[in-house]
Amino acid sequence: MARAEAPTIPRSREDAERSQRGQVARVTVEDCLKRVNNHFALVILAAERARQLAAGAARLVECHNKSAVTALREISDGRVFFNENIDETVRTFIAEAKQIDGETRSAAKRKRHGAG
């Protein structure tokens, strides 16, 4: 049975040029999961770091990619990581999301019934 290739982040123009010269610099989900062993936690960490980069934070790796890819490169390189316990961070994130969802549903219900 053939083994499927690991999912990769879309290549930048810089990566495409390196590839043509024989220097491939691609980041895969598996590279990141070596550092953060929970898919959901990886998404939380990468999203937060991408927002920081988009807001002007200094890049910790040398590249010219968009914020999301740069965040994944930083994670796979071990330069960005959770300071907290990952399991607790994921549980907190889920609890906060549920609370926000519940508040949104309550507000929508009040609006529908004219109690807004």
Image (cartoon, grey):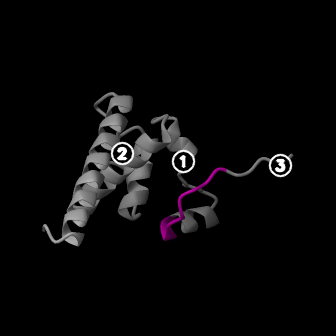
State the extent of the magenta-drawn residues as a range: 6-14
Mark 3 closeness class: few <14, some 14–19, many ≥20 residues within 10 Å: few
Quadrant housing the C terminus:
bottom left
Query: Which image quarter: residue 17?
Result: bottom right
Q: Is residue 99 left or right of residue 27?
A: left
**What label does residue 2 carry, if any?**
3
Task: Compare marks 1 and 2 and give the one earlier in the sequence.
Answer: 1
Query: Which image quarter: residue 88?
Result: top left
When the figure is inspected, residue 36 is found, relative to residue 25, above or below; the finding is above
- Residue pictured at 24% horizontal, 66% vertical: 108
Q: Which residue is mark 2?
A: 45
Mark 1 closeness class: few <14, some 14–19, many ≥20 residues within 10 Å: some
Q: Nearer the viewer, residue 47 or 101?
A: 101
**Is any atom of residue 58 visible in this view?**
no
- Place of residue 5 in the rendered image (x, y in percent of width and height, measured from the top left): 70, 52
Dot 1 lies on which element? helix
Dot 3 lies on which element? loop
**The disc labelled 2 sits on which kind of residue?**
Leu
Q: Report the number of discs.
A: 3
Task: Compare marks 3 and 2 and give the one earlier in the sequence.
Answer: 3
**What label does residue 106 carry, if any?**
none
Q: Nearer the viewer, residue 61 or 31?
A: 31
> Residue reaching furthest front?
113
**The disc labelled 3 sits on which kind of residue?**
Ala
- Residue pictured at 30% horizontal, 54% vertical: 101
Q: Nearer the viewer, residue 19 or 88?
A: 88
**What label does residue 29 carry, if any?**
1
